[in-house]
Image: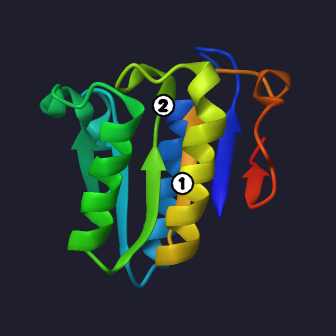
Amino acid sequence: MVNLLTGPKGSGKTQQMIERANELVKGCDGHVFFIKKSHRDTYSLSFNIRAICMDDYDVITNIDEYLGFIYGMTSADHDIQAIFIDGILKHANIALENIPTFIEKLKKISKDNNIDFYISISATNEQLGDVNMEGCQILN
């Protein structure tokens, strides 16, 4: 399942993502990853969550490289239960027009590996009109 948390910039999506991740990891049997742009707010995450800051991987510059990074994570760790991606539009030059393709590929990864994705996007639900919502859930 791909879960989407939408809203304008500054509407509290990051804090909601951190709270969801911290709550999920309490009752989870697998691993939880939290991908974010920078090291900011990293200490708000539970120590049981693997925080990944994309600023450390500046060679990832497009959607294909970003998806390759996620495939690498899933192939190296078969116990991943959830991956949180905060502020996807800030990562690897991913733009709003790339989101439908990105989400379709995440749905495939989710299905093939039994991983739930939680994605925050600085956009309105209307701006995501081209996204096929089958296999997705809007969290707000």
Q: Position of residue 53 (x, y in %)?
A: 24, 36
Residue under the point 52% across and 35% down:
15
> Could you tell me which quadrant the C terminus lies in?
top right
Look at the image and tell me whether residue 114 can be seen. no
> Could you tell me which quadrant the N terminus lies in?
bottom right
Q: Where is residue 72 in the image (x, y as percent from the top left)?
A: 25, 60
Other-residue count near label 1 (Cα within 10 Å), few / some / many at <14 / 14–19 / ≥20: many
Give the mark nearest the N terminus, 2 or 1. 2
Q: Distance between the residues labelled 2 and 1?
A: 12 Å
Q: Where is residue 24 in the image (x, y as percent from the top left)?
A: 51, 66
Residue under the point 46% across and 24% down:
94
Q: Type of residue at label 2? A: Ile
**Residue position marked by numbered label 2 in the rendering:** 88
Which residue is nearer to you in this view: 121 or 110? 110
Q: Is mark 1 on a helix, strand or loop?
A: helix
Residue 136 picture quarter? bottom right
Which residue is nearer to you in this view: 81 or 70? 70
- For the image shown, how many numbered marks are present on the structure? 2
Q: Position of residue 66 (x, y in %)?
A: 34, 40
- Foreground disc of the pair 2, 1: 1
Residue under the point 67% across and 44% down:
4
Residue 124 picture quarter? top right
Vertical comparison of 57 with 2: above or below: above
The answer to whether 49 appears left or right of 121 in the picture is left
Q: Is mark 2 on a helix, strand or loop?
A: helix
**Residue position marked by numbered label 1 in the rendering:** 106
Residue under the point 27% across and 71% down:
75
Q: Type of residue at label 1? A: Leu
Vertical comparison of 113 with 44: above or below: below
The answer to whether 16 appears left or right of 3 in the picture is left
The answer to whether 122 appears left or right of 86 in the picture is right
